[in-house]
Image (cartoon, rainbow, N blue to C red):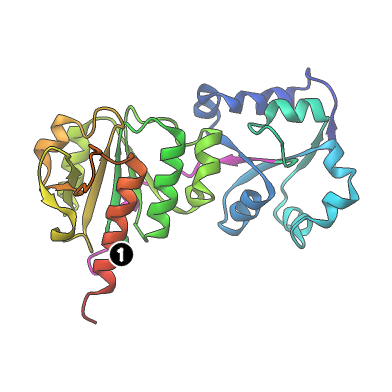
Amino acid sequence: MKRIQSADNSIWKSILKLRTRKGREESGCYLVEGLHLMEEALKCGAEIRQIIIRSSFTDSRAAEQNLPDQWEEKLRQRGIPVIAAADALFDKLSDTETPQGVLCVVKKNDWPSSFIFRRGSGTPESNILVLDRIQDPGNLGTLFRTADAAGYGGVMILKGTADIYSPKVVRSAAGSLFRLPVCFVNTPGEAAALLKKEGKRILVTDPHGGKNYFDVPLGENAALVIGNEAGGVCGELLEAADTRVIIPMAGNIESLNAAIAAAVLMYESVRQWMQQPT
């Protein structure tokens, strides 16, 4: 096991760059923190480039007893290098107040742009989630996690959305980034054209008017658009929508949090799909 003791170490410097969006974009890699997410990455076949362990973590028998069974053997079998970093250096890489002691450098999945459309009608995977300039990292991670749980086939990301590979998003997505195919598009027009070409019905959330969500078919072939937290769905996608959807409000609240609204709609998809006649 290699050990890093100095901030002048070139390996440590290259990993530190992954704390920034620019560094992640240039390298094509991102950081994953914690034992649970490391196990998820291994289970999902993510390409792990390096494991970084806090030095005091490796020296703690109590910590070793809490490691997942055979994790070291899994790393050896896959040829993944393990590096022990001095505690102070490791803590500069970590994004949490109380580091768990394990970080992974993971290569971003290079999904073909068509991969989120790989599932046909009749399955929940034919639904996809479209994110229009979502900014809050907690919302982003929760949206991925919920789409994964609801069986959606993938996520389309419009330009202007926050970095899905930032540490807070990765943490709140709880492993869903390893599993869900992602497609990036530059403009709303490009998104609408691609969705129409693939036979998806574009459904947008619009608090100002539309059909109640439980009156709208959401069980399959839906492209559910969730808009920016402050401004909602952009005008171009509103115009391109096949259906505008509202979530009725019984109280005085004008709208729900973006991730909560998406969860309500995605699980309506699940309900409808499960109630289809077999």
Residue 128, compared with residue 133, is above or below; it is below
**Which residue sits at x=57%, y=50%?**
46
Which of the pair 48/55 is nearer the observer? 55
The answer to whether residue 216 is magenta is no
The answer to whether residue 115 is magenta is yes
Q: As shown in the figure, which amino acid type bears the numbered disc 1?
A: Val
**Which residue sits at x=30%, y=46%?**
261
Range of the magenta residues? 103-123
Q: If the image is split into quadrants, where does the N terminus sit?
A: top right
Residue positioned most to the top: 8
Q: Where does the image place residue 221, in percent across and percent down from the top left?
A: 21, 59
Q: Which residue is mark 1?
A: 270
Residue 17 visible in the current orientation: yes
**Which residue sits at x=31%, y=48%?**
262
Q: Where does the image place residue 163, in percent across and percent down from the top left?
A: 44, 31
- Name the chief secondary structure element in magenta: loop
Q: Residues within 10 Å of mark 1 (few under 14, many from 20)?
A: some
Q: In screen coordinates, is 141 left or right of 126?
A: right
